Amino acid sequence: MNFYRYSSPSAFYPLAGTLAPWFGWSASLLAIAGLWIGFGLAPTDFQQGDAYRIIFIHVPAAWMSMFIYLVMAFWSALSLGFNTRLSAMMAQALAPTGALMTFIALWTGAFWGRPTWGTYWAWDARMTSELILLFLYFGVIALRNAIDDDRRADRACAVLALVGAVNVPIIYFSVYWWNTLHQGSSISVAAPKIAPIMLTGMLIMALAAWFYSIAVALVRVRCIILERERGAAWAGLVAEPGKA
Amino acid sequence: MTAEPAAGTLDRPTPSLDSGVWSGVRWALLRDLRLALRSRAELGVQVLFYVIVVSLFPLATSPEKNLLALMGPGVLWIAALLASLLSLPRLFANDYADGTLEQIALSPYPLPALVSGKIAAHWLTTGLPVVVMAPVLGLQYALGGEALAVLTVTLLLGTPILSMLGAIGAALTLGLRGGGSLLALLVLPLCVPVLIFGAGAVDAVHAGLGATANLSLLGAGLLVAIVGAPLAASAAVRIALD
């Protein structure tokens, strides 16, 4: 079987349609299981009380936020290098999910910070770099929206995503360094060895976040394919099956 | 990358490969400098903008000397960032609007060399005045001798990086709706490390750590930017011209 066949939007469209529900349902089931473990089975933390339970949402979202940027940069590089349309569409489809995950990570982090650190926002290195990551996502999305020509938007966003990907580690270390220079880590969560049940819940939630992101990206890329291939005969047949 | 050397686009003979890079840089640099110097009023306004922004901060916060000395480096850096951002549209937009940029891209010189020249001219006309003004403005913020010197050196190392990152953003947003604020959204997050290392150097001096680490990191960033940014910016120019 030739996998390169699926680099064509018309071949990938039905494949994405087949895969999306599987990932979607797996994500739902895993999320139910993970939340049940996290909020039902896992014991209350002796230091942080019940506030720690936010990690079951927060940590997977934070992981995804950074990982999706890398995946987006990977598809961008492919689209620039091989001039493939579908890669650029994948990058386009991933950006909003990445921004959402970044936002969730920041939001839940603030809710966790209030009872634990006593403040919604501290200029902690991780929080700050996550905030800047959100700006980077917004930049890619805004640039895409400002360009009418799809192919130009593809390539411009790809260049921006790659420049951003080079910058993300630099930003992370600079922010980390900035905060440690200003003040010693005033808030240290004395990391106790995490209980196996908590770890299990968190990993299941991480898997759920993965599958959710894949499912949503596939559904979104289907919309993008239809929208951008609207001139093609097959897309017309998909959109309006009656009118052949 | 260029298909055919277009004869007559530049009043120069086709350059040989090894001399092409440097003469391309020089050509673009001299041309943009000449253009900038013909509208001196515009240059003056940019420097004034920088001075005014820096002068407004004490009015909005506090004239208390210790506080001023604490935030002075950050204020000067933010103002330098804004001044660089404000002048970025001049880098490519005028040439793009009247078609010159297309001719430049068609010339036999390598495009990254020409873009480098333009970036260098942008820095000489916007970054260098900021660096030169910094010691004077730093005095307003009650900064001492060593802090002033370190601040000036960080600006000297850092403002070229701002110009280079800005050039990528300016090329990506050529001819787009809402170009100015979009440009800010694209460029400002990328400038965070420069800001941190630049403004942090003076803090490090105050803390008795010495500014060597910050200056080395800024210098490293400058070298990386010199290698990478012209390539990315010229790729963006080509995308805009397609």
Image: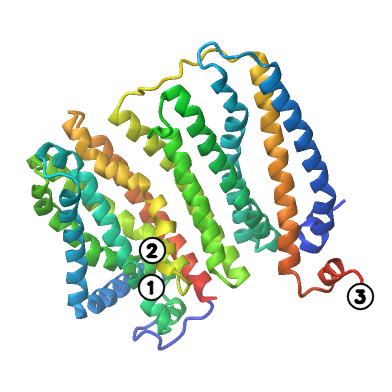
Give, as a three-letter code, the residue at label 2. Answer: Ala
Q: In what element is the residue under mark 1?
A: helix
- Residue at image coords 39%, 67%: B180
> What chain is tagged by disc 1?
B
On the same chain, marks 3 and 1? The answer is no
Asked if the residues shown at circle 3 and circle 2 are in contact, with their CB atoms under 8 angstroms apart, the answer is no
Asked if the residues shown at circle 1 and circle 2 are in contact, with their CB atoms under 8 angstroms apart, the answer is yes
Determine if residue B211 is in view. Answer: no
Q: Quadrant of residue A49?
A: top right
Residue underneath mark 3:
A244
Q: Residue furthest top?
A: A46
3 vs 2, front mark: 3
- The image shows residue B4, relative to residue A134, as above or below, that is below
Determine if residue B131 is in view. Answer: yes
How many other residues sit within 10 Å of disc 2, few (<14), some (14-19) or many (≥20)?
A: many
Give, as a three-letter code, the residue at label 3. Answer: Ala
- Residue at image coords 42%, 42%: A170
On the same chain, marks 1 and 2? The answer is yes
Q: In what element is the residue under mark 3?
A: loop
- Residue at image coords 33%, 65%: B119
> What chain is tagged by disc 3?
A
Image coordinates of residue B178 in percent, x first then y, are: 45, 69
Give, as a three-letter code, the residue at label 1. Answer: Phe
